[in-house]
Amino acid sequence: MLLILTTAMSNRLRYIADLMIRDMLGVEVMFTTSVDEFHGCSGPKLAYTTKPVPDTLNFEASGLLFEKGIRQQGLTSSRVAEVPVLFQLANPAAALPFDPFAAAFYMVSRYEEYLTHKKDSFGRFPATASIAWEGKFLDVPVVHLWAEMVGRLLKQHFPGLQIRHPEYRFVPTIDIDHAYCYRCRPLIRTLGGIGKSLLNAHFKDIYLRMQVLAGMAADPYDTYDYIRTIHEPYAVNPLFFILFADYGGNDNNVTITSKAFQHLIRELDQHQGVGIHPSLSSNKHYLKLQAEHLGLSEVLKRDVTNSRQHFLKLSVPKTYRSLIQLGIRDDYSMGYASHPGFRAGISIPFPFFDITRNETTSLMIHPITLMDVTMKDYLRLTGEQSLEMIGKLIGTVKSVNGEFISLWHNESLTGTGRWLGWRRIFEEMVKLAAT
């Protein structure tokens, strides 16, 4: 047990202390605002105050965790022992030359995303607008490093204190934007696809489509047995996120009323696990989100509690509030489509803290590390460059006892067309991450 003396109690401080000290260091925490109670404690303790306390381990509070509103912080990053830091301090009496608790809160709460109006073409907060991009530490799980700094100081002052880190985990996830390439589509879309192939002289596509529809060939996007086969030797089960939405715009999965599609969903849920992949348009229309969630729940005959946003379209705090209202308990959208790494500076699940409501919520955020489309389409990496990046990221996550959460699509694992050669990348990643 660790006793923390604080200038004032706040939900922000309790939240980040629980995350950094309890969840990342394995040490339970208690708080007090009484100096007498603090000095009367003979066990492990630290002071998180705006003024130093004599003869104790002092972490100077920058003030962010005692505020209740949101304001521009005017932050810049610097380095301490090669580790990127925020909320730098000049007080030599402070245990560290920055406020690790304020810095961690700023990152995991996504404070900066409440403030900016910068959006990409899909209305997403861009990686290039983040403090992590500006400070060149998007590929660094800084919150883990800051927690480790705090842990080392605690061990120096209290050698008997037991530090217990979480164990590394690999969590593979698959998004199903298009369950099948040719199957389970209405006649008008099938005819439209044939017409498009004719206009582009893609006669092989027409032939394959006819073969698939006649039951004489497997659908190219039917990679589910392959996915299961790759993971089975490592006793790892991927999570599947299903786009269960009406056709339109960027939401163009197969017909949701198709019996074959619904059978596939139930089969995946039985062997691995299924969550909702809310449509892009549902981000602005709660009733549409509600209908999609209800529809998938009815197919599965259970409440769906996992989710990931289509196109990783995440609007903080609006998206998370909608998911909580829906009954979602775990979301896997925390990542950038354009760049790999650590959007929130962390690689373990953490509860969403709603800043404007000043409360810790029931929604657990599972940050993703890497996506297939990021490597191929956004960064235009070769296979070897992708493997190098994957290896570095897995090594980084393992070094901080985090969770490596990968995001692939069933259609990117066809091993043909524009994804020719990418099965090898996927298989190497699973092997590296699972062993």
Image (cartoon, grey):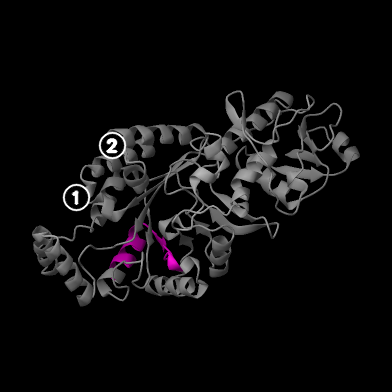
Residue 360: horizontal and vertical position, in percent? Answer: 66, 56
Give the labeled residue for mark 2: 382
Image point (36%, 73%), residue name: 246
Which mark is first along the chain, 1 or 2? 2
Residue placed furthest toward the right = 36
Residue 155: horizontal and vertical position, in percent? Answer: 68, 27
Number of marks in the image?
A: 2
Q: Which residues are magenta?
A: 263-281
Q: Quadrant of the N terminus?
A: top right
Between marks 2 and 1, how big is the CA–CA gap?
15 Å
Image point (80%, 26%), residue name: 93
Residue 425: horizontal and vertical position, in percent? Answer: 28, 40
- Most foreground residue, 79 or 275: 79
Q: Quadrant of the C terminus?
A: top left
Q: Is residue 277 left or right of residue 146?
A: left
Give above or below for 121 relative to 41.
below
- Is 183 a magenta residue? no
- Most foreground residue, 380 or 138: 380
- Most foreground residue, 421 or 37: 421
Give the labeled residue for mark 1: 417
| Mark 1 neighbour class, 10 Å CA radius: few under 14, some 14 to 19, many 20 or more | few
The kind of residue tagged 1 is Gly
The reply to whether residue 109 is visible in this rendering is no
